[in-house]
Amino acid sequence: GKTNNTDTQQDSGLVPHVESITESLSLIFRDRDAAIQNATQARYNKHQESYDAKTLDDVLGIAVQQTFGIGLSYDFEHFDVPDEKDVSIHQMRARMAKSAVRRKRELDRKMKEELEVLRRLKNNVVTSKTKDVAEEEMKEVESE
């Protein structure tokens, strides 16, 4: 007969992390959405560790993680495109990610500039609360 080899205690010496691997595979078959969320969170954590340690194992993945707060892997060759007709789906994903990161950073920079303008306006405009103080200062200046 067929033997059932699901004893993780027996296999744990042979395969490192067999319990977590078994649980991950089991989760994939039970709840695909949860499995994807767990994988994304695991990748997010890995990217954060790499960023903190400055190892930068997956530079584009880390850029996406730091910019958007999501864990996706771009740990594949996506820089060289021998022929535009032969662009792989991975290269297309990488192009979209690079474009999204670039655009998000551009929007963040513009938003920061706009906020700075608004702060300067707020600080430099006389309001109804500061009107009396401004009038007193003007009288002092005019009387001198």
Image (cartoon, rainbow, N blue to C red):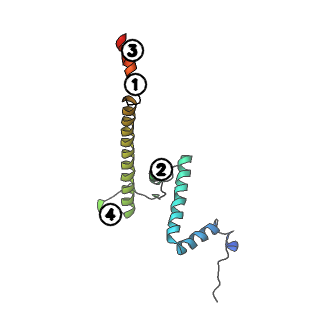
Question: Residue at position x 36%, y 49% from top?
Answer: 103
Question: Residue at position x 49%, y 69% from top?
Answer: 33
Q: Residues within 10 Å of mark 4 (few under 14, many from 20)?
A: few
Tell me, for residue 86, which label it has, or none.
4
Q: Front-most of 52 and 106? A: 106
Q: Front-most of 55 and 98? A: 98
Residue 114 point in image, percent of width and height? 36, 39
Residue 57 point in image, percent of width and height? 51, 52
Quadrant assignment for the N terminus: bottom right
Tell me, for residue 132, which label it has, or none.
1
Q: Are marks 3 and 2 in contact (CB under 8 Å)?
A: no
Say if 54 sits above or below 76 in the image: above
First in residue order: circle 2 vs circle 4? 2
Q: Residues within 10 Å of mark 2 (few under 14, many from 20)?
A: some
First in residue order: circle 4 vs circle 3? 4
The residue identified by callout 2 is 66
Residue 132 point in image, percent of width and height? 40, 24
How far is mark 3 from mark 1, CA to CA?
12 Å
Question: Residue at position x 68%, y 69% from top?
Answer: 12
The residue tagged with tag 1: helix, strand or loop?
Answer: helix
Q: Are marks 2 and 4 in contact (CB under 8 Å)?
A: no
Q: Residues within 10 Å of mark 3 (few under 14, many from 20)?
A: few
The residue tagged with tag 3: helix, strand or loop?
Answer: helix
The residue identified by callout 3 is 140
First in residue order: circle 3 vs circle 2? 2
First in residue order: circle 2 vs circle 1? 2
Q: Are marks 2 and 1 in contact (CB under 8 Å)?
A: no
| Left or right, 53 with reference to 95 | right
